Amino acid sequence: MAREAESWAAHAHRVLAASRHHTGAARRAVLELLDSQPCALSAVEIEDALRTSERPVARASIYRILDELERLRLIQKVQVGQAMTRYEPVRGGDEHHHHLVCDSCGTVIPFSDSRLESAIRDLSRRVPMRVAEHEIVLHGECRSCTD
Amino acid sequence: MAREAESWAAHAHRVLAASRHHTGAARRAVLELLDSQPCALSAVEIEDALRTSERPVARASIYRILDELERLRLIQKVQVGQAMTRYEPVRGGDEHHHHLVCDSCGTVIPFSDSRLESAIRDLSRRVPMRVAEHEIVLHGECRSCTD
DNA sequence: ACAGGAATGAGATTCAGTCTCATTACACTG
DNA sequence: CAGTGTAATGAGACTGAATCTCATTCCTGT
Ligand SMILES: [Zn+2]
Ligand SMILES: [Zn+2]
Ligand SMILES: [Zn+2]
Ligand SMILES: [Zn+2]
């Protein structure tokens, strides 16, 4: 399957179109910004970035769109520290991952670890709750801040 | 050592006294409320609870006290979802633990798992950051919400 | 092209959390 | 035990992310 050829934005757009009627320009602008970005963005950063673009999008729309994308599992929240929530594309259903956060400079670095995931999977079965999600964040100091 | 006999509040009070000069009534009120509670509390819940008690404490003081307690590792933040930050006593340095959060009713259930911790410990060594802390939250639906 | 309903925008609003600074209370000294 | 210096506290203004409202605009199917 030529899935590699399809951008995340295009995929997300199709999923979005399949799950509701309209597909406005605001959605497209947000999708494309998210897809172009290497890192997780906050709603405010998205608003700022789009304000100066050819397709500004209102705050209310951004939050609505992000909610929708999250419900469809097209993006995921990244909670780093107590600061504002960030969002990043969930690409290709492939790599589930978590984050390292530098408490000095705020840098967010993704990582994945199969042993950790398997421990979580195993644990989820023994716990008094139907576990749907998990969040793992490692805090510390990144290389550049330690030097 | 008769450590069992000493309440967390009393322990915290000693640590606090050892690390600074004054030890006001506001601090005592917050310590005792935290100690008496089975679950993690938010700053707002603490403020509300104390407002109707015999020793109301101002919001600014509550946040100051919580910051101080956290720096001394007497309490720990519990970030569940995107909601407001909660705080819970760190008792006896003993059981490091994490939380299950029911996304329906908001219930928070503590758990600990040595395999998970060892996976984290191991992982922390292989990662491009000096890891100081970690947060793990499992989300899902608790038994009462599933029924 | 049209109608009906979904999507969007602008701004008011909420609310956790922070900041300021005047006042109070603690702990030590004499 | 009163006096003094300093830390702690309180009241409320302030900040900023996130939510809400509702009038307007724009899709989409017919
Ligand atoms: Zn750093
Ligand atoms: Zn995982
Ligand atoms: Zn529940
Ligand atoms: Zn742990």
Image: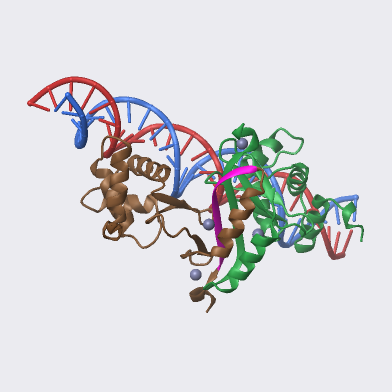
Chain colours: A brown, B green, C red, D blue
The residue lying furthest to the front in this view is: A1
**Which residue is rendered at x = 50% and y = 61% of the image?**
A99
**Which residue is rendered at x = 61% and y = 50% of the image?**
A124
Percent x, y of residue A115: 58, 64
Percent x, y of residue A116: 58, 62
- Please give the range of residues in magenta: A129-140
Name the one closer to the observer, C5 or B44: C5
**In the image, is A25 to the left or to the right of B63?**
left
Name the one closer to the observer, B115 or B135: B115
**In the image, is B96 to the left or to the right of A9?**
right
**Which residue is rendered at x = 33% and y = 60% of the image?**
A37
**In the image, is B142 to the left or to the right of D19?**
right
Percent x, y of residue A122: 62, 54
**Which residue is rendered at x = 64% and y = 33% of the image?**
B144
Percent x, y of residue B17: 79, 59
Residue A124 seen in render = yes
Residue A49 seen in render = no
Q: From the viewer's perspective, is residue A107 above or below residue D8?
A: below
Q: From the viewer's perspective, is residue A11 above or below residue B46?
A: below
Q: Main secondary structure of the magenta part?
A: strand
* Residue A139 belongs to the span the image colors magenta: yes
* Residue B2 belongs to the span the image colors magenta: no
Name the one closer to the observer, A26 or B53: A26
